Every structure is written in C-alpha cells, then in structure tokens.
Image (cartoon, grey):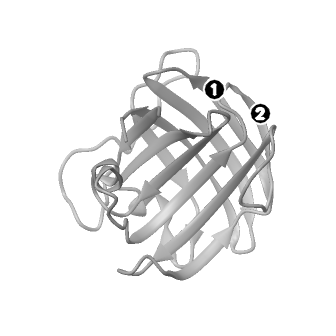
Amino acid sequence: MKCFVCLFLLAGCSSGGGNNGPLPDLALPPTPGWTLSGTLSGFTLQNEAVSGEAHTVSGSAVLVQLSSRSKICDLLQLNSCPNGRILGFRVGATVPGSFTVVDKEQPASGEAHIFFIDLDSQCLENSRVDATQGTLTVHSSTDSLYYFSFDATTPEGPISGEVAAAFCQI
C-alpha cells in the first residue's frame, strides 16, 4: 500500500520549526509543506495541522488525513486511535487532475470529499463538518510525493489550501 506523510506544526503547542509558509511555485517540484485557510468547529485549520498521511485506497482513490496529533503515520502503523482533530480528503483517483468536491464519503471517479472531524479518546466523533461544494486539484502524484490544492465551501464557511505530502509506508 502506498502511503504519504506530511509533517505539520501545531502553533499552539510548539514553538519550534516546521514549514508553515507558502508552498513552492507549481512549476517547481514541491517539498513537503502546507498552507491552510479557514475555521471549522471553532478551530483554525492552519493551527490544527500537526502531521498527516495519505495512502491509496483500493488502488483507485487517495485518502489524506491531516491531524492535530503528531506522528499520525506512526499512530496508524500501530493501529492506534488518532484521536484529536482531522482534516480529511478522499480523492476518487490516484492521478493528477481537477475534482469536484461532493458531500459524500465515498466519492466516485472525478470527485473528492473534504471533511473535518473532532475525535475523542475512544475515536468517537465530537463534531463533524463536511464540505458541500468546491474543487480539489491534484498537481502531482508520484511514488514519493502527493501534491494538491483545494477551495471548498462548508456550512461553516469557506476553506482552502495546498498540501504536499511525502511518501510513508503504513
């Protein structure tokens, strides 16, 4: 199973390092990093993204999870509950292209689903917000990097950003 990981910094819990600046120009090969805009369930997305992972699902879709927990890839390798807040992206293809954001958990080919959940220590949802419309564009998808941008609308307002995720094995 192919997996990708992108490390993030939680501004409220750490004072060191991390790349929270703009990602490189689309014409250049990106390095792992992110920019996020928007607030969901009272949480500012840029401040919540600590770590992330992405992997292919059934060989035909990609699931990306950005978490408020550090080392999300390690937690998932151990089958541990990634309690905390998760901004998730499920893309109905593994190749670059533009995808319509839909409000359904299993998007079809050509579609993407964006969601934000707050999980308790038992992995039960405290709250959930799903994007209802928008666009997600996969700029590149290789064995070592998954790079995409998104612009979507939720019942709580607009969200947008760019994510470049490095390869990780789960």
Q: Nearer the viewer, residue 72 or 131?
A: 72
Q: Position of residue 28 (x, y in %)?
A: 51, 15
- Number of residues whose C-alpha sits closer than 10 Å to that of mark 2, classed few (under 14), some (14–19) or many (20 or more): some
Q: Position of residue 146 (x, y in %)?
A: 52, 30
Report helix, strand or loop for mark 2: strand
Q: Nearer the viewer, residue 113 or 7?
A: 113
Specify which label sits upstream in the sequence, 1 or 2: 2
What residue sits 36% from the left and 67% below the top? 81
Q: Position of residue 144 (x, y in %)?
A: 43, 22
What residue sits 72% from the left and 62% below the top? 131
Q: Nearer the viewer, residue 150 or 118?
A: 118
> Could you give the CA–CA distance between mark 1 and mark 2, rounded to whole angstroms?
9 Å
- Number of residues whose C-alpha sits closer than 10 Å to that of mark 1, classed few (under 14), some (14–19) or many (20 or more): some
Q: Is residue 80 left or right of residue 22?
A: left
**Quarter of the view holding residue 26:** top right
Which amino acid type corresponds to the residue marked 2 in the rendered image?
Answer: Ser
Q: Which residue is mark 1?
A: 139
Question: Outermost residue toward the left?
Answer: 16
Report helix, strand or loop for mark 1: strand
Residue 148 against residue 69 in the figure, above or below: above
Residue 142 against residue 154 in the figure, above or below: above
Q: Is residue 116 left or right of residue 60?
A: left
What residue sits 65% from the left and 30% below the top? 94
Which amino acid type corresponds to the residue marked 1 in the rendered image?
Answer: His
Quadrant of the drawing holding the C terminus: top left
What residue sits 65% from the left and 31% below the top? 138
Residue 102 against residue 63 in the figure, above or below: below
Q: Nearer the viewer, residue 81 or 19?
A: 81
Q: Which mark is residue 98?
A: 2
